[in-house]
Amino acid sequence: MTSTETDVPVGASAALDGDVALDENIVEFDAFDLEHRPDPYPRYRVLRETAPFCPVRLGAARVTVATTYEGCSAVLQGAEWGRGYTEGLNPFRPGVAPGEVPGGSFLGMDPPEHTRLRGLVSRAFTPRASLAEAPFVRLVVDRLLDQAVAAGGLDIVEDLARPLSLAVMCRLLGVPTADGPSLVSWIGGIARGTDPDYLLTPADIVVRTAAARDLGRYLFELAATRRALPRDDLLSRLVTSQRDQEVLTEREVIELCGLLLAAGLDTTANLIANGVLALLRHPDQLALLRERPEILPAAIEEMIRFDPPSQFVTRVALADTTVCGRPFRRGDGVVVLSASGHRDPTAFADPDRFDVTRYAASPPARRHLGFALGTHYCLGAPLARIQAEAAIGALARRGGDLSLVTEDIEYRPNAALRGPRALLVNTPGTAG
């Protein structure tokens, strides 16, 4: 919402008295409509060229969208911005209590509580710890691709990206892989519900609530098992920390693990699928990556910039502040449309061009916002990169004439966590 709309909850349809002039400046923004899911970027450009902080109407809601790289990065890094739930500032989910935030209360926390809980799990996601998982990740990738070759076809999403990220998160947390189908179902319901509530149907919210409840019950029982018989996994370390130091409540353990599962599965799967799609639609860049395999890490960064797995996040002003000359009042909410910032020509040269060497240049391109910035920077970013490098690198090395079975790509309904529902390609060769 804009600073003059502070008293109007997001989702209200009536304008304030005397607010006619404001309504005249509201943009009817349709980029989050399903019809634009395959390519929202032209619609983002229209918004970006309208204003760096653009008031838009999404259904009955009026919100402010940060559209430029400068505006997005300033909000993400600003100390005056956060989730807002713990302070009763909840413009994007009216009526949702802090403990009912999709993904768990940790997702809605700001410092100092957020800092305390993040510190308890951060060591499991450092670049060094993630690199230690690389051999396991490569083994899973090879097994999944070999299975696809034997079956005679490959869906990048369901045969590679999602089972890979699920296997990695199950290993990290100590979740039995046999429980994978149930986890995928629950996490799917939670992930759909991570969009702001005004982009959801009542049925979506019911499914989200039920999925969060069922996943919580499952993790509660698993935590009890790990408490009695600890193993070498993150869940065991968390319940041991709870017992020995009394720094974590039982609910915090369950919600932390639930959040890590949900975030790790969908974000990483979308990163891999979106990255493969970009390569297949730009065969010259795939050929260049095969010629220069050493640029794979830089290519992954360009994939995140070009078509990020997370299109936007929301932030709330925790105090009166000014960003890029735009005043905000405490309680104002902003949709940080980082996917639009990635296409900002003032930040990136020829931003609509997919260039796998962009981050291999000297100096490299500006830092992308695909994993956010600041206090809420994505904890699992190093592990997501390891998985993307393993999966996409293996596809490139196996050779063959990789191509899409169809250009008609159906996307999942999520606006924020944007990725294809399926991505069918010809079966790659087996030569590693």
Image (cartoon, grey):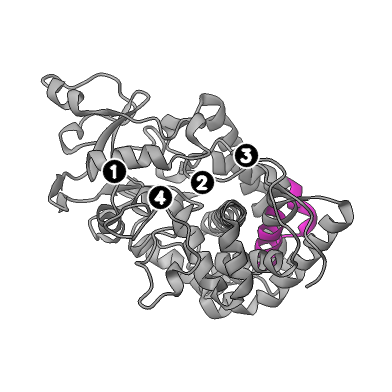
Tally of marks: 4
Q: In the image, what residue type sits under mark 4?
A: Ala
Label 3 element class: loop
Secondary structure predominantly adopted by residues drawn in magenta: helix
Q: CA distance from mark 4 to mark 1?
A: 11 Å
Residue at left offset 15%, top offset 34%: 4
Q: CA distance from mark 4 to mark 3?
A: 19 Å
Above or below 300: residue 411:
above
Q: Are marks 4 and 1 in contact (CB under 8 Å)?
A: no
User: Where does the magenta region start and end?
Assistant: 162-181
User: In screen coordinates, is 54 left or right of 272?
Assistant: left
Circle 4 sits on which residue? 339
Between discs 4 and 2, the one toward the N terminus: 4
Q: Which mark is residue 32?
A: none
Circle 1 sits on which residue? 48
Circle 2 sits on which residue? 417
CA neighbours of label 1 inside 10 A, class few (<14), some (14 to 19), many (20+): many
Q: In the image, what residue type sits under mark 1?
A: Arg
Residue at left offset 51%, top offset 25%: 202
Viewer-proximal residue among 75 and 97: 75
Between discs 3 and 1, the one toward the N terminus: 1
- Residue 74 placement: quadrant: bottom left
Q: CA distance from mark 2 to mark 3?
A: 16 Å
Between discs 2 and 3, the one toward the N terminus: 3
Circle 3 sits on which residue? 409
